[in-house]
Image (spheres, rainbow, N blue to C red):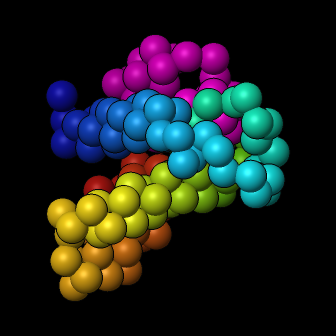
Amino acid sequence: MNPKQLILISTMALVISLGSMMQDDKTYAAHSNPCPLGKTSNMTAQDEFHMMLGVTSDEEVHDALYNGQSLADIAASNHKEVQPVIELQIAQLTEQLEMRYKSGSLTQRQYEALQSELRELVTNSVHGNPS
């Protein structure tokens, strides 16, 4: 497996694990603000991710990533915009960082450093560009 595929597979694994964590998080499930991305109240984060990419399963995403496509390529091939995918991943990772900071597993300096790099990291990852 080449480095680009490894990065893409790692990104997908991160998204899947974050989606599972977000689905189980009662705070996330109880969040009452409407999602600007059209998410319905009973839609899981993983369902939303699939909808944004125009796929029906993690296997579809995994296979496409393994075959060298990026998340942006997957979205484009399904006539979907890539920016909502980027924004969803940034929102999920931001929430993850906030939870880690509030729990004490990140210092303020670490939190701020990670937060400042988040948009670029996610954008590059979604487009298949190694950082």
**Residue 35 is one of the magenta-drawn residues:** no
Image point 37% across, 74% down: which residue? 115
Query: At 42% across and 18% down in the image, what residue appears?
Result: 63
Residue 130 in which image quadrant: bottom left
Residue 73 visible: no
Asked whether, in this view, residue 44 is left or right of residue 65, the answer is right
Q: Relative to 42, say whether 82 is above or below.
A: below
Q: Which residues are magenta?
A: 46-70
Say if the magenta span includes residue 69: yes
Between 43 and 12, the residue placed more toward the observer is 43
Of 1 and 24, the residue lying toward us:
24
Q: Is 40 positioned to the left or the right of 75 in the image?
A: right
Pick the front one: 107 or 67: 107
The spot of residue 73 in percent (x, y) is 56, 39
Q: Main secondary structure of the magenta part?
A: helix
Q: Is residue 59 above or below residue 120?
A: above
Q: Is residue 80 above or below residue 77?
A: below
What residue is at 18 percent from the left and 28 percent from the top? 1
Whole-percent x and y of residue 18? 41, 40
Number of labelled discs?
0
Instruction: Tell me if I can see residue 18 in this picture.
Output: yes
Q: Residue at x 47, y 32 (%)?
A: 24
